[in-house]
Amino acid sequence: MITTANVKNGVNVDQLVETIGAVQQNPDLAKFEFRSKNDWIEGGHCVSNIKGFYGVGQEDTSREATFSMECDHPNVLLGKDKAATPPEVVLHALGSCLTAAMTYHAAANGIDIESAESTLSGGVDLHGFLGLDPEVRNGFDGIKVILKVKSDASTEQLENLAKFSPVFDMITNPTPVSIEIVK
């Protein structure tokens, strides 16, 4: 007998429901730890490598390849413009995570999404980063996300689904960060 997977929005809904059930039965399966190793090249140019992570109760070894991402700064910010800036990578992460959260949760709720695209922008005032004004933030003064979605769901439904994004949570709520310098 041939069975067809129950796929909605590119998400295998049967596997999603099984995952939800497994986490309800064993809450420890929900604990994940993601990691990145970053190496400085020169100036503002860095390369991060990502491969292993912990999840579903064990160290994951399923990834065959290491993912590499670079960051740099444009010439006007004294970089060599070899890659996106770190703030641009944050925008990429936020847009990707909002979209994925929305489509996964939509699939779980039987909502079809035909297409989705997002445009993100964030303003930065260099007075903070350059140490010229302690009242000015070093980072974004705000982020604007325009998420264009083709779906029969209401705008409010889609916005609520997108807000399940872990990256949205990290950015909108203070996330403790500890820095340890090792010499």
Image (cartoon, rainbow, N blue to C red):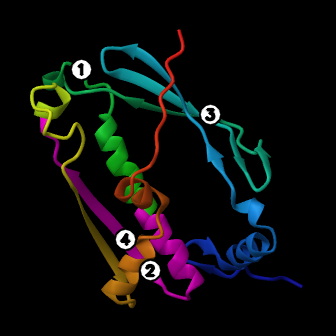
The mark lying in front, picked from 2 and 1, is 1
* Residue 9 in magenta stretch: no
Residue 144 position within the rendered picture, expressed as x and y whole percent measured from the top left: 22, 60
Circle 2 SS class: strand
The residue beneath circle 3 is 66
* CB under 8 Å between discs 3 and 4: no
- Residue 159 vs residue 117, the one in the foreground: 159
Disc 2/disc 1 C-alpha distance (Å): 40 Å
Q: Percent from the top left, x then y, of residue 108? A: 59, 82
Q: Is residue 87 above or below residue 2?
A: above
Q: Label 4 is placed on what type of residue?
A: Ala
> Is residue 64 placed above or below 79 in the rendered structure?
below
Tell me which amino acid carries mark 2. Answer: Ile
Residue 99 location, x and y as percent?
42, 66
Q: Closer to the N terminus: mark 3 or mark 4?
A: 3
Element class at badge 4: strand
Q: Is residue 116 found inside the magenta-colored segment of the image?
A: yes
Quadrant position of residue 22 = bottom right
The answer for how far apart the CA atoms under marks 2 and 3 are is: 31 Å
Image spot of residue 20 (x, y percent): 70, 75
Contact, mark 2 vs mark 4 (Cβ under 8 Å) = yes
Location of the N terminus by quadrant is: bottom right
Disc 2 marks which residue?
Answer: 113
Q: Which residue is mark 1?
A: 79
Query: Of discs 1 and 4, which sits in the foreground?
Result: 1
Question: How many residues crowd mark 3 within 10 Å: few (<14), some (14–19), many (20+)?
Answer: few
The label on residue 36 is none
Whole-angstrom CA distance, mark 1 to mark 4, is 33 Å
- Whether residue 9 is visible, yes or no, is no
Which secondary structure, mark 3? loop
Residue at 14 percent across and 39 percent down: it is 136
The boundaries of the magenta stretch are 98-125
